[in-house]
Image (cartoon, rainbow, N blue to C red):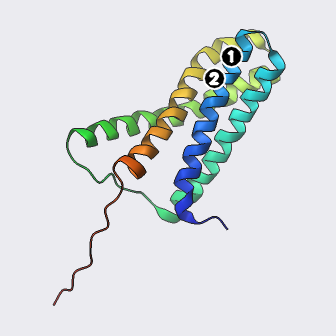
Amino acid sequence: MIPLSDFPAIDATLNGTSALLLMLGYFFIRRKKIQAHKVCMLSAFAASSLFLICYIWYHAHHGVTPFPRQGAVRDFYLTLLGSHTILAVVIVPLVLTTLHRAWRGWFERHKKIARWTLPLWFYVSVTGVFVYGMLYHLYPQVATPLRYVQ
């Protein structure tokens, strides 16, 4: 069994992998390498789907990890987290619709929505990595010593 404490790093890795695969998929389609594009985009979808499963599992068993700092850095973090969270919800039906249109062979319709889906999906993937970095590496939780109370 994977330790619960490993899940945030796993999630960030899956988000980073999705971002990389999305950029490779874009690179390939711009060069008309359709099969390579398809493999990259389906792999990005698989990585994002696995991320979602791991994310839900972690938060169902761990709960919320609060951001430990105050001031401007907290405001920045919460703005980043807020945009990430809202767009993460928005992106799910966009990704499914984009993939469905490609699957059905409706490539003109696929291309129209993919112009919106790709940058939003990429943003969500990259900001997921930044949120992880800020929460677990730049500003990690500080353990407070237990005090004896009489």
Spot occupied by residue 10 in the image (x, y as percentages of width and height): 59, 51
Residue 91 lies left or right of residue 150; in this view the side is right
Which is nearer the eye, 41 or 108? 41
Real-space CA distance between mark 1 and mark 2, rounded to the nearest whole angstrom: 6 Å
- Can residue 105 be seen here? The reply is no
Residue drawn at x 47%, y 35% is 127
Q: Secondary structure at mark 1?
A: helix
Q: Residue at label 1? A: 27
Instruction: Specify the farthest residue to the front.
Output: 137
Residue 101 lies left or right of residue 122; in this view the side is right
What crowding class fits label 1: few (fewer than 14 Cα within 10 Å), some (14-19), or many (20 or more)?
some
Q: Toward which corner of the image does residue 78 lie, by quadrant?
A: top left
Q: Where 114 falls versus 130 (above or below)?
A: above
The quarter of the picture where the N terminus appears is bottom right
Q: Where 133 falls versus 76 (above or below)?
A: below
Spot occupied by residue 19 in the image (x, y as percentages of width and height): 60, 31
Q: Secondary structure at mark 2?
A: helix
- Can residue 90 be seen here? The reply is yes
Q: How many marks?
A: 2
Three-letter code, disc 2: Met
Residue drawn at x 63%, y 34% is 18
Q: Where 19 falls versus 149 (above or below)?
A: above
Residue drawn at x 50%, y 40% is 129
Whether the residues at callouts 1 and 2 have beta carbons within 8 Å, the answer is yes
Q: Which disc, if any, is residue 23? A: 2
Spot occupied by residue 81 in the image (x, y as percentages of width and height): 40, 39
Three-letter code, disc 1: Phe
Residue drawn at x 80%, y 22% is 36
Spot occupied by residue 120 in the image (x, y as percentages of width and height): 53, 25
What crowding class fits label 2: few (fewer than 14 Cα within 10 Å), some (14-19), or many (20 or more)?
some
